[in-house]
Amino acid sequence: MDSLPDLNQIKTITKNGGRLKEEDEQLSPMARLFHEPGSNVYIISMLGCKTKIDPHVVKQNLLHSLVRHPRFSSLQVVDEETRGIRWVPTNVNIDNHVIVPELDPNIAFPEKFVDDYISNLSKSPIENSKPLWDLHLLDIKTNDDEGTGVFRFHHSLGDGLSLMTLLLACTRKSSDPDALPTLPITKNSGYIKFTRVWSVLEVLWNSIVAVVMFVLTVLFLKDTKTPLKGSIGVENRPRRFVRKSVNLADIKVVRNAMNVTLNDVVLGVTQAGLSRYLNRRYISGESGNDNETYDRMKNDIIPKNIRLRATFFFNLRATTTIDTLVETMKTGTTGRWGNQIGYVLLPFTIGLKHNPLDYVKEAKAVIDRKKASFEPLYTYFVVYLVLKLFGIKAVGKLNHKVFFNTTLWFTNVPGPQQEVTFYGHEISYIAPSCYGQPNALMIHVTSYVDKMMFVISADEETIPDPQQLCDDLQESLHLIKTSVLEMESDKTK
């Protein structure tokens, strides 16, 4: 990212509590971290529109909603005296943030154009002379949509859940233009629950193991070099964003039959999809023949004992509600806002399995151990400890080394349970992702009404066929569901 502008004089206006006081305007350590080399991450969110986009309507509504949030109407400026970064309120010129390129409505390959346009956004940062967000409105008809909107936010503005919830606060139910959408409710809100002495010991043991693995990863422990592992400098290369929707009902069938969570199923599908993709890449690398690759897909030639881990992000705050953020945009206050995320190092067992249900069982066992530990809290607070002792540069290097030594980022954010409109425009899908991370691959999973979507952010130099990975994820869910139905059928005989 270009260097931030220096600040000669800071003037902060306080109006009816609508702005934070001057001494509270410093960026948080986590927000500052996203300005460090190797951690300069942007969140991108793609919106498919069923109706033609009206830029004037979008601009006018943004002025009365998103722009009223202090983080979206403030510059990030370097203080000359302290060299820290501060939030400085500014007047927002909406035309500098909403970009509407002139497009040929008769373009030959509209889907490819939209994909290329979004990929090109990952080649350049947002100018720091304005608040670090923008919205691109592509008035071009594709097979499924009348237009596409692409939000881009610098990660220092907030974490994925905060930004997703804020975006949804700008939407309304399609069935009721005055009603806000609702998000799925997690039944078990507590992170760790102690029910017996043994559970306390289990949590302590899992936490110790996690800390040891974290330290080893910082020092020297790297994932195996596979066709998914990015090379040095991968965070500076452009990304390709692809997506694949599957039926949420299919995932629920597996969940109910195996008595697991939706997240367990999604992780099992991911592990299976990665295994199928890697097996294909290893086969094609040997033969160079696509037909032979297809014929040999049932043969497992993946090297044994591959170490392949995901940095799996956890939200550490109490759930942010849509209603709260609507109030935030009305009053101009930030409330409990920012980057409050921890992460765990989640190992995947890579290899083809005779019984596809084993992928889900293994994923559940691993994620249950991670839930029964303090690992997300540890990774969150270690940032503040290192920051206190050694400064922000050391924190940036530490996180970069951990992220680069693993293979991918994985995260999931729940989406609305009802179809929604964005300032009157009917939405067909919401697909969030990231770029700028020191991994060649990120898998983001989100729900929308009756669909679950896998969104892939891939470095094409490492992963030249990300759509194939999407297809492998879809096929893996099909195989797992088929095995569940066969298992249920056997029980009834």
Image: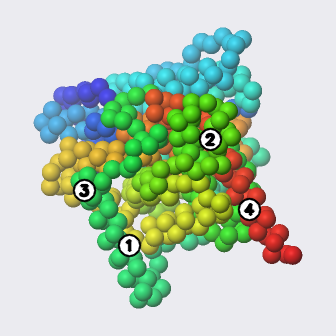
C-alpha gap between disc 3 and disc 1: 22 Å
Left or right of 330, for residue 343 = left
Q: Secondary structure at mark 4?
A: helix
C-alpha gap between disc 4 and disc 2: 20 Å
* Residue at 59% across, 26% down: 115
Q: Amino acid at mark 2?
A: Cys
Q: Amino acid at mark 3?
A: Tyr
Q: Answer with mark 3 or mark 4, whichever residue precedes in sequence.
A: 3
Residue 384, disc = 3
Residue, disc 4? 483
Q: Secondary structure at mark 1?
A: helix
Q: Position of residue 315 (x, y in %)?
A: 45, 58
The local crowd at label 4, few if under 14, some if 14 to 19, many if 20 or more residues have their Cα within 10 Å, is: some
Name the quadrant of the N terminus: top left
Left or right of 325, for residue 83 = left
Q: Nearer the viewer, mark 1 or mark 4?
A: 4
Q: Nearer the viewer, mark 3 or mark 4?
A: 4
C-alpha gap between disc 1 and disc 2: 32 Å
Q: Nearer the viewer, residue 176 or 407?
A: 407
Q: Amino acid at mark 4?
A: Ser
The local crowd at label 2, few if under 14, some if 14 to 19, many if 20 or more residues have their Cα within 10 Å, is: many
Residue 244, disc = none
Residue, disc 2? 470
Residue 257 showing in the rendered view: yes
Q: Answer with mark 4 or mark 2, whichever residue precedes in sequence.
A: 2
C-alpha gap between disc 3 and disc 4: 46 Å
Q: Answer with mark 1 or mark 2, whichever residue precedes in sequence.
A: 1
Quadrant in the picture for residue 316: bottom left
Residue 206, disc = 1
* Residue at 18% across, 28% down: 8
Identity of the residue furthest to the bottom in this view: 197
